[in-house]
Image (tube, grey):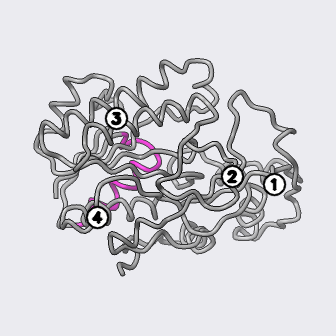
Amino acid sequence: MRFLVTGAGGMLGRDLVDVLTARPDHRVTAATRADLDITDPAAVHAAVGGHDVVVNTAAWTDVDGAEADESAATAVNGDAVGHLAAACAAHRVRLLHLSTDYVFDGTATTPYPEHAPTAPLNAYGRSKLVGERAVTRLLPDAGYVVRTAWLYGTHGRNFVTTMLDLADRRDTLDVVDDQRGQPTWSRALAHQLVMLAEAADTGRAAPGVYHGTCSGETTWYGLARAVFARHGLDPDRIRPTTSARFVRPARRPTYSVLGHGRWAEAGLSPLPDWHATLVDAFAPAAPLSPWKVV
């Protein structure tokens, strides 16, 4: 298949391009922000042509910044996704669009299924929901929304790299223990996206919403302790605290655990447990083999 990856300069985008270029059966066009402005409908239409699958990893990711300029965030996370979906519809191309757990309000106590009602708490979540709705409206037969959360990886700053950086500069770290979610390695998600595209191509994966997070759950505090332990650092240097100690412009969901029911319908396993992928992420050579297909 011929893939177009938008946002190819970002953490997930770079991993996805690496995974695809290692596969001789696929070709990939890597479009960074400098290569393709997804807010430009004409540029998007021209870029989509000649491909079989578009994977949109481009996004406004500044959650707190979206509170100050929701219209700018929506232009990228919502309106631009509509341009991509319209172009995919015109060229008969499948679209895999990355969304977020922030479309939920975080009041659940059990994992959110893919069909759960959405209710964003903040501007970022609202902007991403606009993009989701554009995909489902314009591409009912060829649009795939993949919600992910708590991403970390080699490329770019994220919670895991921040913890390791701070470990060299502080004796102890206070980390919130009242937000639950699923730490997700970006390389593992990249493999899952490729397998979803392949399952869609063979008719096994129906369009709609999928949850692309690792299995299991923990808190930011639990993740920080696991990161320290994995790197031979004393996890007791991590101290639990509450979100009230770290007030930020955008409200965060308290509970961001997502269910993975739709993967089985496509004949695919969900992503592995977050503990296992955390080990793989820091192995001497991160594996490129895709996860088991059931």
Mark 4 is surrounded, within 10 Å at the Cα level, by few (under 14), some (14 to 19) or many (20 or more) other residues, namely: many
Residue for badge 1: 177
Q: CA distance from mark 1 to mark 4?
A: 36 Å
What is the quadrant of the N terminus in the image?
A: bottom left
In reply to whether residue 11 is colored magenta, the answer given is yes
Q: Is residue 243 left or right of residue 67?
A: right
Residue placed under numbered mark 3 in the picture: 134
Q: Are marks 2 and 3 in contact (CB under 8 Å)?
A: no
Label 2 element class: loop
Give the amino acid type for the residue marked by disc 1 in the picture.
Asp
Predominant SS along the magenta part: helix
> Mark 2 and mark 3: span between their CA atoms?
26 Å
Magenta-tinted stretch: 7-23
Asked if the residue under mark 1 is in contact with the one under mark 2, i.e. CB atoms within 8 Å, the reply is: no
| Left or right side of 163 for 209 | left
Q: Which of the two labelled residues, at mark 2 and mark 3, occupies the earlier sequence position?
A: 3
Camera-nearest label, 2 or 1 = 2
Q: Position of residue 96 (x, y in %)?
A: 32, 49
Q: Is residue 88 left or right of residue 62?
A: left
Task: Report the Cα–Cα distance between label 3 and label 4.
Answer: 20 Å
As for residue 218 lying within the magenta part, the answer is no
Question: 44 and 27: which one is in front?
Answer: 44
* Residue at figure coordinates x 37%, y 74% from the top left: 289
Do the residues under discs 4 and 2 have CB atoms within 8 angstroms? no
| Disc 3/disc 1 C-alpha distance (Å) | 35 Å
Nearer the observer, disc 3 or disc 1? 3
Amino acid type indicated by mark 4: Ala
Between 201 and 230, the one lying in front of the other is 201
Measured as percent of width and height from the top left, residue 182 is found at 62, 60
